[in-house]
Image: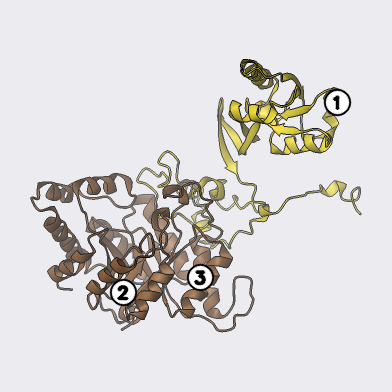
Amino acid sequence: MSFKDQLHSGKFAVTAELQPPKGTDLSELYEYAEGWRNRVDAVMIPDLQNGIMRLGSLSACALLKEKGMEVIYDLSCANRNRLALQSELLNAAALGLKNLLLLQGDPPSMGDHFDAQPVFDLDVMGLLGAAKRLQEGYDLVGNDLNGKPVFFVGTQINAAAQGHRLDLELMTMEKKIREGANFFLAGSIYDPGLLENFMKKAAHFKVPVIVGITLLKSVGMARYISKHVEGASIPDAIIDRLLKAPDKQKVSIEIAGDLIRDVKPLCQGIQIVPLGWEPLVPILLDQVGL
Amino acid sequence: MIVAERKPLDEIKEMVKSYKKLLTVGCGGCTSICYTGGQREVGLLNEDLKNSLEKEGMATQPDSFTIERQCNADFYPELDEIARNYDALLSMACGAGVQFLADRYPEKPVFPALNTIFVGIDKDVGWFEENCRTCRECFIGETGGICPVTRCAKSLFNGPCGGTSREGKCEVSKDTPCAWYEIFKRLKDQGRLENILKVKPAREWKNQTRGTMIHEAYQKRYAK
């Protein structure tokens, strides 16, 4: 079943993030992806995430698709102008990639080529609009396309926002739906209460929301995320649990499992972000019966 | 105002050290206001240059002259007389002023002593902040007078990226307020939040090509 059919059928979707290599050795990428076969419904390959230069999402997605895996192709506005973005969308369509995650992207100043010129020619709303136009058979300046692509388009939201930020997020969500968003990916959630509040307010949009579940690999990482990553406030109880655990890996998986159980009734799917613990993804899924 | 900062002394020295008679030309316009290229700064730079070049046994002798604005021919006649006595000119104007100077004296090597940084405001004494990218498509009437193209790290013109901190700061730079958080607060206070729901089309980035503007009142004068 395609990722689109799955979300439309109402069956809970399990996706996982797989970083492409920094280089051309694909053995690890294939090994991890094989380990997830028949366990995750789609593999999402990030596009120059955090401004770090790597193999692109496009080729990694195409190669995994050839091996029969459902993939989600990421494309961001940070490093390409509107010509390149539209061309990449056509490339994706030509390679048979239908599931898109369109993102604003991270400025190069955050990454390993921090002197690079940021592009941001289009913003994510413009990129969503471009995908919509291409599917209608036109490019952004109204030229006819010879053959039009078909996509299932996702984009990001911050479901942990509160106060003014939450109101603003909901307004932006409404605009993104108008510009063609078919599903949303919410950045990692550690406090199901925040997600519940968000989902109550976003329920009327009736657009599927996939929620990020990041494996917390250490107390230091949890503290860092809580302090520095916006929208990722980690409750003290989780950090304490990790701190007291003799086997950090086991407890980290338990924490992620508990989070999945808590968020499952609230959303339409999850995206596991293993950050180097890719082989543990099936173990986590076993724990939660997915 | 155009804000500029002085280049490192070593870089300036490298450019000018082979010229014996050097005239450092100050500008009484923007770069004077941001304490970078006015009469006082010309004096300070020449002092630094003189001391440093003397130590290295170089013969360069920098003199100084400051005109009211380096980007307008009306202020040049007096400098025309002086400039002819020099081997090279070192400009302390913005990039536009340096080019005007170089076009005025095409036979002379002209060097920039400053890096032009941005179009900005005086936040406080000696504290300048960029507030305009000169995109030629101003839409800040819709965003509460706050320019997200300039003040958002990702130049977003349709809402925030999702990386706004609990304190309303930017994820790229913790000290910078999130432009969209500020826009939201201002529009909310003004009862104009519906503006945020409008989808703004992609920018045209007209500033990627060189601009020329002839004021309406002068169109006839310059008609070809």
Q: Quadrant of residue B167?
A: top left
The residue singled out by tag 3 in the image is A88
How much space separates mark 2 and mark 1, taking CA atoms? 73 Å
Going 81% across and 48% down the picture, which residue do you hit? B214
Q: Estimate the x, y position of residue A257 in percent, counting from the top left.
A: 16, 63
Residues at marks 2 and 1, common chain?
A: no
Q: Secondary structure at mark 3?
A: helix
Give the left or right position of residue B171, taking residue B142 as reference. left
Q: Where residue A54 is drawn, which disc sits there? A: none
Return the chain for callout 3. A
Residues at marks 1 and 3, common chain?
A: no
Q: Where residue A42 is drawn, which disc sits there? A: 2
- How packed is label 1: few (under 14 Cα within 10 Å), some, or many (20 or more)? few
**Pick the front one: A217 or A100:** A217
Going 77% across and 28% down the picture, which residue do you hit? B88
- As shown in the figure, which amino acid type bears the numbered disc 2? Ala
The residue singled out by tag 1 in the image is B84
**Pick the front one: B192 or A40:** A40
- As shown in the figure, which amino acid type bears the numbered disc 3? Glu
Q: Kindly indicate which chain is depicted in yellow in the rendered structure.
A: B
Select label 2 or label 3 by which is in front.
3
Q: Estimate the x, y position of residue A282 in percent, counting from the top left.
A: 18, 70
Q: Quadrant of residue B66?
A: top right
The N terminus of chain A appears in which quarter of the rendering? Answer: bottom left
Q: Kindly indicate which chain is depicted in brown in the rendered structure.
A: A
How much space separates mark 1 and mark 3, taking CA atoms? 56 Å
Q: How many marks?
A: 3
Q: Mark 1 touching mark 3, by CB under 8 A?
A: no
Q: Estimate the x, y position of residue B211 in percent, counting from the top left.
A: 74, 50
